Amino acid sequence: MKHTEIRKKFIDFFKKRGHIELESASLVPENDPSALFNSAGVQPLVPYILQGFHPSGRRLASIQKCVRTTDIEEVGDKTHATFFEMLGNWSIGDYFKEEAIQWSFELLTSGPDEEKGEAGFGLDPERLYITVFAGDDNAPTDDEAVECWKKVGIPPERIYYLTEDNWWSPGSDGPCGPCTEMFYDITEEGLGDLTPQEFAAADERQQVVEVWNDVFMEYEKKDGRVIGRLKHRHVDTGAGLERLLVVLQGVSDIYSTDLLKPLKDRALKIASRQASANIVTDHFRAAVFLTAEGVHPSNSDQGYVLRRLLRRAILKTDDRKLNTEDVNDLVTKVGEIYGSVYPDLVQRQQTVVDILNEEVGKFARTLETGLRALERLIDKNGGIANFYPDGDLLFDLYQSYGFPWELSIEELNNQRASAGLDRLDTAGLRERFEAKMEDHRLRSQTATAGKFKGGLGGHSRQEVLYHTATHLLHAALRRVLGSEVRQRGSNINPERLRFDFSFKEKLTQEQKEEVEKLVNDWIEEDLPVLREEMTLKEAYENDAIGIYEGGENDLVSVYSIGDTPGQVVSREVCGGPHAERTRELGVFRIRKEEAVSSGVRRIKAVLQ
């Protein structure tokens, strides 16, 4: 079963059960300053879950692009990846445990059904193992989920009670609750019934693969503690496409599937060890997707992660370098694999190639500079026999020159071996280096928090004007392109605005000119910008748009541009600040319009 067939089968299954298909959100979150990337299918939906409703309906399904680096050291084994796609279905205050479990089991195990005109994945139910929440101070044992599993035919001896792994939470705040996970036996002979200890060992050895997770969100967390139940109960499910492919195609790991094998075959030409080729495959795929969405390599935020992924990939190649042909081939291969699903990868292919080649060249120079800096330190200390580095020094090399830990240790050990000295004891060095890295990571996250809050970087006069302009731009896009257009993110600084929105096609020159003219007409009309306070429910009933992370009875600010019913051109739930009248904005000019991801476009504009 090919990856394209699995995507279609999943979406079709849930469409027939009343779910509305959502397009994948961008990898960069639009309204979540606590995270650099969307790392789960539910992440873009959390604000809707908190407010208890979604404009598209209560039953939703999508295939969401994700980036997750928490397990980066595990990448290269059978199942871990930094970039992956999550197949998910959601209930926003609609169905709950029984339906979610029944449909998960049905889609995983059912074969062709001529009467329904559909077919599931046809997996052997005898190879399924289930985990459920064992209970703790937050919530009781999930006996309800156990009974649901028994009802579909899972024997009690295949159901295991766990605590930490079977409680889902987005962090310190937000909706949370118990979950139930589905594991599949991928061994040749089959493991049969397992004790809890044997199951844990099989999971550790990757003899069983987690293929699906159903989360039952009925609690709310505040400042790290569960404070009570949500007003409505919700379901979030996630099935990793890459892991599903492993079990459905009967291969040993995600890199042997029809999705990743073509890319790995090319990676093997520059990284001859299997584990190294796996890492190059994963990291380069992630780098291509991030670059195609407008992320550029840098020393902070998303760009820092992109730079780290690309450089880790380079270090895993046999010669610790990539030439332009390697970069071109790898980018092209990613486009060939994913182009039919994410056409922006093909449309932006040359841009991605140019950016990644530039970064590869920078890293080559970084390695050269770092080696010279390390050599100077050795000479300063009287030679390799007298040089005893500490973790702080190695981190400074990394921070100042981008010189990786692995290369520092490798170069030092090579020189020590040439001098007849023992290898360095790296345990303490590594511990201190990682402590410095963790401190750097936390500082980066703290700096990021608030930077993406509403897209507003600060509150300077010019930023306030640009923020007001995004409301007019949003309204103009919806008027020209249709009311299905929705904001997907924004970023504002004193020099320009950047606005991401949902739309499947490149804007024509005529459409861009019409949008620009509408905004400037509204500016010229000198419309007042008015603030009203009302409940979120009232705001949506009065045709306000926007996302607010709270309940429907919360009081929110609604900003309207125009003061009479026929004159109001925009009404949005927003925290502000805004200009008082539109003429303060000056002249609006669109500088660039481009694709960000599948179904998401970006406009960069200035005020003159």
Image (cartoon, rainbow, N blue to C red):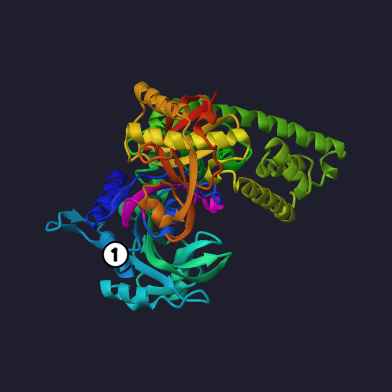
Q: Is residue 206 left or right of residue 308?
A: left
| Residue 213 percent coordinates (x, y) | 39, 62
Instruction: Indicate whether residue 376 is drawn in magenta.
Output: no
Can you name the residue that lies furthest to the front here?
Answer: 564
Q: Is residue 162 above or below residue 299?
A: below
Local packing at callout 1 (Cα closer than 10 Å; few below 14, some 14-19, many 20+) is: many
Instruction: Work out whether residue 310 or residue 426 is closer to the camera in this orientation and state it.
Output: 310
Instruction: Indicate whether residue 66 is drawn in magenta.
Output: yes
Q: Residue at x 55, y 65 (%)?
A: 222
Query: Residue 492 falls in which quadrant of the image?
Result: top right
Q: Residue at x 36, y 41 (%)?
A: 565
- Please state the extent of the stretch shown in magenta in the rendering: 54-77
Q: Is residue 524 left or right of residue 3?
A: right
Q: Is residue 281 left or right of residue 212?
A: right
Q: Is residue 24 visible?
A: yes
Q: Number of callouts in the render? A: 1
| Residue 591 percent coordinates (x, y) | 48, 24
Instruction: Work out whether residue 253 or residue 471 is closer to the camera in this orientation and state it.
Output: 471
Quadrant in the picture for the C terminus: top right
Can you name the residue that lies furthest to the left here?
Answer: 115
Give the residue number, with chain letter if any, for mark 1. Answer: 105
Q: Is residue 185 left or right of residue 380?
A: left
Instruction: Work out whether residue 379 or residue 517 is closer to the camera in this orientation and state it.
Output: 517
Q: Label 1, secondary structure: give it.
A: helix
| Residue 347 percent coordinates (x, y) | 39, 28
Instruction: Work out whether residue 357 or residue 452 is closer to the camera in this orientation and state it.
Output: 452
Q: Is residue 192 above or below residue 309?
A: below
Instruction: Give the residue type at disc 1.
Output: Phe
| Residue 538 percent coordinates (x, y) | 39, 55
Q: Residue at x 34, y 78 (%)?
A: 156
Q: Is residue 267 visible?
A: no
